[in-house]
Image: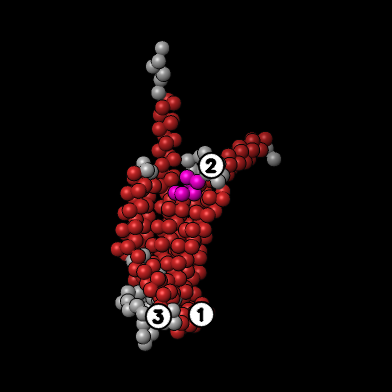
């Protein structure tokens, strides 16, 4: 092997090592947060594609959808207290309810001077809800049908809009609070609480006969994908702006005597 080729290989290897190290560096503008965000996006998109493909092809999960929906509907009239509670949960997380919760959370973030997170929230939740409308019309899946339904809805079923909205709202708030938390125990409790709220909203849709199991699973996957795009994108933009400002300050001459 020629010496100049060996030097070229060494240079390329060194550049590759620096590139990989930068992608896993928490301090880099395009570092660890971007790597994890892209990984989360790819995993969520893969999960959504898998579920959507199974629904379109009539895979076994659609049979489970029907059996679970029938079983839940048969038991839904046996517990008035639970049904009333879950109706309250599902109405609170309807489109007007989620937008109201989002506005309240945005106002709270603004008062805490967390304006970056406020803007991220205002982009993430309404944007994801609009994306879900497009997804519903793309798949055009009919909702579960019962002779005596608890809820009567005329919109499409797949993916679940309530599950998407809950994933976006509570997922983004969990991202914010985990950044503010000072211990791993607190972060774990925040993530568990967010997951519990998302599961509660999704479960209310199943119990009330508004969605199939695959609808809510796809909704959560869709929400995770959009959340990864928004949080990672805004964080990367903020970090790059901060890095440019720092370089600009460093390049300015020192006017002090």
* Neighbourhood count class around disc 2 (C-alpha, 10 Å): few under 14, some 14–19, many 20 upward: some
Q: Please state the horizontal and vertical placement of residue 135, each as a whole percent of the image.
A: 37, 67
The part of the image, by quadrant, that contains residue 22 is top right
Look at 40% across and 78% down and name the residue there.
80
The part of the image, by quadrant, that contains residue 167 is bottom left
* Neighbourhood count class around disc 3 (C-alpha, 10 Å): few under 14, some 14–19, many 20 upward: some
Q: Please state the horizontal and vertical placement of residue 156, each as a whole percent of the image.
A: 35, 74
Task: Give the residue number, with chain letter if any, for mark 1.
Answer: 64
Q: Is residue 136 left or right of residue 55?
A: left
Reply above or below: 23 against 249.
below
Circle 2 SS class: loop
Q: Can you tell which mark lies on residue 144?
A: 3
Look at 43% across and 51% down and name the residue there.
231
Nearer mark to the viewer, of 3 and 2? 3
N-terminal-most mark, 3 or 2: 2
Distance from the alpha carbon under mark 1 to that under mark 3:
13 Å
Of the 4 image quadrants, the one containing the C terminus is: top left
Q: Is residue 209 left or right of residue 154?
A: right
Q: Main secondary structure of the magenta part?
A: helix
Q: Please state the horizontal and vertical placement of residue 192, each as a whole percent of the image.
A: 52, 58
Q: Is residue 30 magenta?
A: no
Circle 3 SS class: loop
User: What are the residue bounds of the magenta stretch?
Assistant: 176-181
Look at 48% across and 82% down and name the residue there.
71
Task: Give the residue number, with chain letter if any, for mark 2.
Answer: 26
191 or 243: nearer the viewer:
191
Q: Residue furthest top?
A: 257
N-terminal-most mark, 1 or 3: 1
Say if mark 2 contacts mark 1, CB within 8 Å.
no
């Amino acid at each position: 092997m020629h010496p100049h080729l060996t030097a070229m290989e060494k240079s390329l290897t060194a550049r590759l090592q620096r590139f990989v190290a930068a992608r896993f560096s928490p301090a880099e503008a395009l570092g660890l947060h971007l790597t994890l965000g892209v990984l989360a996006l790819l995993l969520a998109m893969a999960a959504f594609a898998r579920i959507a493909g199974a629904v379109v092809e009539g895979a076994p999960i659609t049979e489970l959808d029907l059996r679970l929906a029938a079983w839940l509907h048969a038991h839904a009239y046996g517990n008035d207290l639970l049904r009333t509670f879950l109706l309250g949960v599902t109405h609170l997380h309807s489109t007007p309810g989620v937008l109201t919760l989002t506005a309240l959370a945005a106002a709270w973030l603004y008062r805490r001077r967390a304006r970056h997170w406020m803007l991220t929230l205002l982009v993430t939740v309404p944007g994801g809800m609009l994306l879900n409308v497009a997804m519903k019309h793309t798949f055009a899946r009919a909702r579960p049908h019962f002779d005596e339904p608890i809820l009567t809805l005329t919109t499409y079923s797949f993916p679940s809009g309530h599950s998407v909205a809950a994933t976006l709202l509570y997922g983004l708030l969990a991202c914010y609070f985990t950044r503010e938390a000072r211990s791993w125990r607190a972060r774990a409790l925040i993530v568990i609480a967010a997951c519990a709220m998302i599961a509660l909203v999704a479960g209310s849709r199943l119990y009330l006969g508004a969605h199939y199991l695959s609808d809510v699973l796809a909704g959560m996957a869709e929400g995770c994908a959009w959340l990864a795009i928004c949080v990672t994108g805004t964080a990367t933009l903020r970090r790059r702006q901060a890095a440019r400002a720092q370089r600009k300050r460093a390049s300015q001459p020192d006017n002090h005597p």
